[in-house]
Image (spheres, helix red, strand yellow):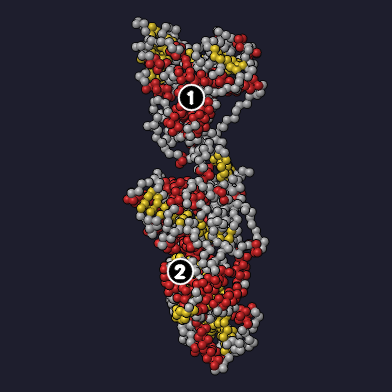
Amino acid sequence: MKRVMSGNETVSQAVKLSRVQVISAYPITPQTTISEKLSEICGSGELDAKFVKVESEHSAMATLIGASSTGVRTFTATSAQGLALMHELLFWASGARLPIVMVDVNRAMAAPWTIWCDQTDSVAQRDTGWMQFYCWSNQEILDSVICSFKIAEELLIPCMVCFDGFFISHTHEAVDVPNQETVDAFLPPRRAEYKLDTSDPHTFSGGTMPNMFMEFRYKLQAAFERAQGVIDETYKLFEQSFGRSYRAAEAYFADDAEILLLASGSAASTVYHTIRQMRESGRKVGLLRLRQLRPFPTDTLMNHLRDGVALAVLDRNLSPGTGGVFAQEVRAALNRCGADYRVHEFVAGLGGRDITSRDVESIVDSLKNKTAAVGTINWLGLHR
Amino acid sequence: MSKFIVFNSHTEMPELPVSRANMAWNKTGSWRSSTPGHRGKTAPCNFNCPAGEDIRGYLALMKKGNVAEAFELLTAMNPLPAVCGRVCYHPCQAECNRHRFDTELQVRSVEQLIGDWGIQNKRRLSFPTAQSKKVAVVGAGPAGLAAAHFLRRKGVAVVMYDENQYPGGILHYGIPAYRLDKEVLQAELARVIDGIEYKANMRLGSDFDFGALDEFDALFIATGAHLSKQMRINGEELPGVESGLDFLKRINSGQKVDMGDKKVLVIGGGNTACDVARSAYRLGASVTVAYRRTENEMPAFAEEVAQLKAEPIDLELLVAPARIERDGDGRLNVTCHRMELGEPDVDGRRRPVVIDGADFSLTADVVFAAIGEDPDMSLTPGLAYASDGTVDFSQIEPRIRDKLFLGGDILPNPRTVPHAVASGRTAAEQIVAFLRGEPYTVPEKLTVVAGPDDVNFNYFTRINIAKSAASPAATGTLNQAAAIEEANRCLSCGVCFECDNCYNFCPDLAVVRTPGGYKANLDYCKGCGICARECPSGSLGMQGGKVA
Amino acid sequence: MNYTPDYDFCASHDFCGHSACPGCGEKILFRHVLDVLGPETMIVVPAGCAAVTDGVFPHSLSPVPYLHVAFGATASAAAGVRAGLDMSGRENVTVMAWAGDGATFDIGMGPLSAIAERNENVLYMCYDNEAYMNTGMQRSSATPLGSWTTTTPAARLKSEPKKDIDAIIAAHRAPYAATASPAFLDDLKAKVARARDTQGFRFLHLFSPCPPGWKSDPADSIAIARLAVESNVFPLYEVYDGERVRLTYRSSNVPVAEYLKLQGRFRYMPEEEARAMQATVDRSYAALKQRHEKSKMSS
């Protein structure tokens, strides 16, 4: 059934359809309407779940760690400062192999204060052992959240679904909302092999000596290494049930592209629209939309690289001292594969500044004209 | 579950850090530098009881109301609880660790209840069938009675001889009825010498001699000390000057003695002097007691002196008789010295010294000498005393000497009922060994006493017994409920009473319950010492080093 | 749930072999608390002495499900366990938080206040050894005035009084809150039972002697725990709904000096401060007795 909903409201629908049992969230702009909507549907009984109204995001994640340890399905949502406040517990959730799903409504990190969009908040958490998905439409949000539960519970890796604050969270789009039965068939109740159970008492996450700790990290890494297979299998099943298909990265006009732009989130849709127009005027430009940061879609990336293609990575985030994070990840993936491509790094849109078609054109032009710097950041839209 | 687990491969490990095994492999006993254990200290009451009663033991049984078991335990060492519960000088109470906390346990009162219970419930001891060996016991005082009783319990046939009509010796003929009721005494003795032949009015040395005892395999002589010491003053032989002991014997034999309106002077400061004075007072006399030292040196039990002073009896201290004369009215005129205390005597008491020129007169109708007793050697021809007070057997025929045992006041023992009982019981054990041809081994005795510092008084509540039946000031006897209540004040010094403190307070659950106590689980005990510190009775202590 | 006294739950589950210090107060408390709560219990434990002495993977001394969590996360994680259990039909399982003073008074204070305010159905127990003992005896807000710790050395002893956690909890109107001491086991166990059988947020403040941190003889741990109560430094009482106070033990008003002298951590306290401490304790205890009287509850 199609409904016109904002990005945030879509999240609530996805959580409801996924039959989440415990939610714990703390309001933060631009996530707040997720909290409010979830409170409403939990309060009305539309969703049979406990919404624990905690006093901070750190407590929200702590609450979910507790709840998830009992074997129930759990969810939270946050942004920026809230996500950062959870930081130590993000490591905890992944180390404890808890399949928690979280939505991060991307917002720039203070200081200075801001409520507007950039991806620095989620990319800064890429080392915490969570899977990360990036959405560009409300439909994708709905589908990604539902899939995340299935993927997370299979791999025992927590998962965050990210989308741009305001640009997507507060934008209404038509979303095809599936019925509960179909979702139930696709996503059965969680079956936790390890959980707090008085009939089979155990201790979880006890002190682990140097001679055994590394093996747990090895296991988590091994799970990440087989994650893409599980993700792809899940998308296949999803397509069968719901008719929509997804890949780790989506390629648009990429097959014969001489210039390939790599982007994520709402910026990717600006890129898409811009290069579609460019294609009409014959320019061979393509887009590879990165939907995953963890696990990084290395294979998909490699499959779409032609010899000689010029690569530009558009980051709406910054790791100060180095540059955009997607760019670094792309460079690392290429190096791993022994592939030799020059990567041009572009940073734009920090703190909610609009990324326009003109910005995209300037990227393409700078690559064509070879005026784009390599090895340093190309700042777009900066007031010099 | 108690192995230390090592994973050889990550494939053996669970996907996430879940612990399923316990910590029992970690033998923290290796941390220990001292180990708790029961110290084997004894309670001061037990240690100080001359009769060797397990007082702590029978008080523990009384706590739960097990009077029958308490009776069995008590009489295993002392067959005379009803007697001792009335007349013993209770050294147990003086040493009771509760003394400074609130009031010492009124052990004697509880003992009396137990003794009376035995009489009321007509307890009979089942003696084994008498064996072929026979022992003669001469003297049916507390030593003889105890010896006869314990010999009989061991299956030895016993015949008792005594110069008096009734058994009991000093219990019947020395201690007045107001201190020890004759009916109670005889009821207890009936149990004690049940099945033992008692030959009354048989005085050794006059009615029979050692030769008549040839049929016996062993002889136990406990004829006591009933000969009054001489005062060695002029006028001692005058009519009206008598032995205090003889006076007591007359009234305890049921004779009517007229003391009405008489003035009585008692010379002496021991229990006999007190008994004489108080008996005379009860017969109507007005009584003065004269003692040559101060109250501090009086050999009588403190309790006796206090009771004497509570009655209208004059106590003249630092007074000694010089000579006795008959005055013009036919009464006795006793010239007395005033004394002062000089240097200490051999026994540590300060020697009384006459103050020159301070003599004075006391008039009396009767003068009782009660300055001490000696054994009457005419009862035991052939026995003599050496100068150091030990017995000289050399003049006894070997065939008698080889089977001859002595006990009670005839020996230089302290002259108390519990000492006599112990003497008789020990003699019985020695005789049994002798009859079996075995060496006699002195039973082991715990020698380390649990003192007040061993007790953890935090676990006991101060109780004021001033208003209860058990109060030292109360007259009358305890009923069973009161005795049980009093027994419940016992601290069980040095002995575990299974309160579970050590078990409960161990942070390592390394205290294990065993029958009658606890032990440390040496695999895990870290030696922290909490168990020993919180042991209420001081039973647990820490010993240095690891105990294997 | 029936309270079965003397239910030797821990004794039947190989509680031995843990690496707590000799004389550790926390372990004495823990075993008796668990004996009352029994097997239908789950414990949430933050960093601290309890967590570290629980054991090393794959070993643990706990006979019940035991969830380690990050230092400041205890209260929230406990609320989460509660939510998860309630959503999976296990409402009868007791959720217990077992946290030290560090995790309770300091880093976890915010979340603790939050679950108290929300009246979460959690039994929160704080074993208070009055400093960050696990990390090497550094001061916490639970450290008493004048105490030595590694961060309040002799030259600069703790100059602030102990945070009054019981008043803070009372201000949250917890249905049931109480103090307890391992030297008074019957009182402790009765309170654990009452807490277990009460719905909503419950808080137990447990006095937990620490020989290395308090510089005391391990053998004295119970004696110190007793003196703390008898000297009114740590009175035993209950608070119902943040208002009604009930003293559960009438102390014998032992001088505070008796309590102090068994502990080396108070050795550096100047004379006048020790005297002032007596006055403070007297005042507090008098106020407590007044609250008890006002509450008109019989002991």
Q: Chain of mark 1?
A: B
Q: Mark 1 falls on what kind of element?
A: loop
| Residue that mark 2 sits on | A47
Kindly identify the amino acid type of the residue bearing the numbered disc 2: Leu
**Which residue is farthest left?**
C294
Q: Chain of mark 2?
A: A
- Tell me the CA gap for discs 2 and 1: 80 Å
In the rendered image, residue C190, in percent from the top left (x then y), is placed at: 44, 48
Which residue corresponds to the image point at 44% horizontal and 14% vertical from the top-left?
B252
Which residue corresponds to the image point at 54% horizontal and 35% vertical from the top-left?
B41
Q: Quadrant of residue B422?
A: top right
In the rendered image, residue A97, in percent from the top left (x then y), is placed at: 56, 66
Left or right, B419 with reference to C259: right
Q: Is residue C22 visible?
A: no
Choose between B380 and A217: the one closer to the eye. A217
In the rendered image, residue B190, in percent from the top left (x then y), is placed at: 51, 18
Give the numbered dot on residue B121.
1
| CA neighbours of label 2 inside 10 A, class few (<14), some (14 to 19), many (20+) | many
| CA neighbours of label 1 inside 10 A, class few (<14), some (14 to 19), many (20+) | few
